[in-house]
């Protein structure tokens, strides 16, 4: 399944020095977010993965995850079953204002 | 998974889970956020009708959201304020020059007059130049002290009555923790104040976003489509506040209410009788309020201008960045002047001045210039960077 990750609010620096989007094919047919995280780490799909993702279940404190613009906590976080055309967004809050 | 419904309107799909566990849709969340800031403004009487207000604008998320919310509330509730934008250019290339572009955009977008003041113009030193001579350990001290004075100057030039800054709840909580760790009792008792005025006859500063969570400011910006610049300050990595920030983030994840609780604790601090606090007086040079005969800004500037960049940072009495050389001393060599001379040591670390090359500074040693070949001069790396 094709998966799109979006990087905002400073999170762009974690991936390919400023790219906003990353699209790839998931290994599972029906991946959960945790599967996506595991795949990203295993295949090194993001340059500085530790800046965003702490483990398969968690992101770094201060990083927000949105699924189709809604907080992922509303969807059981990493347990969420990703659907076709879902957009997973990382937003960093870790910078001066 | 079916989408949860907003608890406020019971109609639209929820997209925000707030720190207090409430679940709201985009429209309701933005409205609730704005109303909370309105509550803060009215409860603490931050503004009076007819006032001119300068919004400290960096182009970053906090001041961008503050701008939008102030404009909305000023119109919605007829605050009767005239709003301006005041921006300080510290001279940090790759960071501030880009964020100022955002401020110019906002100025045009919201139709607000913008004033930009630079450290270079005010002090003849940009932050880049300061870091080059003073190193990266204390640069935030320079920046903070200079910025406060720059804001005052800019506000005075604009002719405003009050300055509003985008400090959020996380910022205030971090500052409480930092002052706690430093044992800075004076600051601890003041740092949660929502209104601050360094100088009683000066221009007060207020923090309308004081009770707003940083994460929610980001969510508001996203859902309300507020543009902002989002890169970390070039000199931020390694800054002390960063460690505190990490700790606070981790604590917030476990118990979201922690930010407001720390602020509440900070607001409740009272200094015991008998505890020595700095006495407010005036700087003998610039007349700014100061607890010392010479205020921090004057002291830092003097240090920069006389080749003693750490004057006022407290590293050394003379304010110089320390340089050392290591001298290997042949055993048996004695200067002969005292019994206790340095030949008893195999190696001696001697402090040197920039212009000092002939001796190690120990007058008893009597090393000759030819011994310089044996010397290795090493800047004390930790002092510089």
Image (cartoon, coloured by chain):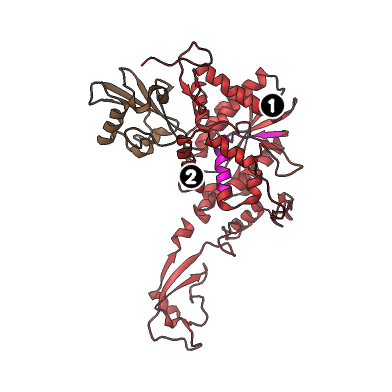
Chain colours: A brown, B red
Asked whether B167 falls inside the magenta stretch, the response is yes
- Give the image location of residue B362, x and y in percent: 51, 78
Q: Nearer the viewer, mark 1 or mark 2?
A: 1
Q: Quadrant of the N terminus of chain B?
A: top left
**Neighbours of disc 1 within 10 Å: few (<14), some (14-19), many (20+):** some
- Closer to the camera in the image, B274 or B87: B274
Residue indicated by mark 2: B242
Residue indicated by mark 1: B42
Magenta segment, prevailing SS (helix, strand or loop) = helix
Q: Residue furthest top?
A: B11
Please report, as a chain letter, where disc 1 is located.
B
Q: Is residue A55 above or below residue B65?
A: below
Rendered residue at 32%/24% (across/down): A4
Rendered residue at 57%/19% (across/down): B31
Q: Which residues are magenta?
A: B162-179
- Give the image location of residue B121, x and y in percent: 62, 44
Rendered residue at 38%/83% (across/down): B331
Asked whether B343 falls inside the magenta stretch, the response is no
**Neighbours of disc 2 within 10 Å: few (<14), some (14-19), many (20+):** some
Relative placement, left or right, of B334 versus B199 is left
């Amino acid at each position: 399944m094709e998966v799109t990750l979006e990087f905002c609010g400073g999170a762009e620096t974690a991936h390919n020095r400023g790219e906003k989007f990353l699209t790839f094919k998931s290994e599972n047919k029906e991946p959960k977010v945790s599967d996506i995280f595991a795949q990203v780490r295993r295949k090194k799909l993001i340059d500085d993965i530790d800046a965003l993702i702490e483990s398969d279940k968690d992101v770094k404190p201060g990083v927000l995850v949105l699924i189709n613009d809604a907080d992922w906590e509303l969807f059981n976080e990493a347990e969420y079953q990703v659907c076709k055309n879902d957009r997973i967004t990382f937003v960093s809050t870790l910078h001066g204002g | 998974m079916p989408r949860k419904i907003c608890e406020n309107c019971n109609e639209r799909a929820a997209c925000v889970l707030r720190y207090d566990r409430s679940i709201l849709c985009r429209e309701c969340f933005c409205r609730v956020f704005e109303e909370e800031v309105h509550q803060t403004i009215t409860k603490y009487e931050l503004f009076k009708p007819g006032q001119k207000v300068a919004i400290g604008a960096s182009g970053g998320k906090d001041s961008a959201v503050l701008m939008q919310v102030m404009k909305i509330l000023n119109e919605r509730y007829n605050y009767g304020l005239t709003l301006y934008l005041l921006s300080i250019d510290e001279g940090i290339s790759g960071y501030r020059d880009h964020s100022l572009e955002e401020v110019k955009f906002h100025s045009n977008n919201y139709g607000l007059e913008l004033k930009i003041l630079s450290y270079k113009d005010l002090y003849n030193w940009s932050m880049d130049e300061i870091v080059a001579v003073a190193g990266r350990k204390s640069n935030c001290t320079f920046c903070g002290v200079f910025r406060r004075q720059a804001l005052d100057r800019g506000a005075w030039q604009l002719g405003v009555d009050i300055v509003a800054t985008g400090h959020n709840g996380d910022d205030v909580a971090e500052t409480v923790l930092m002052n706690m760790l430093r044992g800075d009792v004076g600051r601890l008792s003041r740092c949660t104040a929502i209104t601050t005025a360094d100088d009683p006859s000066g221009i007060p500063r207020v923090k309308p976003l004081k009770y707003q969570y940083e994460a929610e400011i980001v969510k508001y910006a996203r859902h309300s489509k507020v543009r902002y610049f989002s890169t970390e300050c070039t000199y931020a990595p390694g800054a002390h506040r960063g460690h505190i920030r990490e700790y606070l983030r981790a604590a917030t994840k476990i118990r979201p209410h922690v930010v407001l609780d720390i602020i509440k604790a900070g607001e409740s601090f009272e200094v015991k009788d008998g505890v020595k606090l700095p006495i407010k007086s005036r700087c003998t040079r610039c007349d700014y309020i100061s607890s010392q005969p010479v205020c921090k800004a004057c002291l830092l500037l003097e240090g920069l201008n006389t080749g003693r960049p750490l004057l006022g940072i407290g590293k050394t009495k003379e304010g110089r960045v320390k340089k050392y050389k290591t001298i290997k001393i042949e055993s048996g060599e004695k200067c002969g002047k005292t019994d206790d001379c340095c030949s008893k040591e195999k190696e001696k670390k001697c402090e040197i001045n920039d212009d000092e090359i002939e001796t190690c500074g120990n007058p008893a040693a009597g090393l000759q210039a030819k011994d310089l070949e044996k010397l290795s001069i090493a800047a004390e790396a930790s002092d510089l960077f």
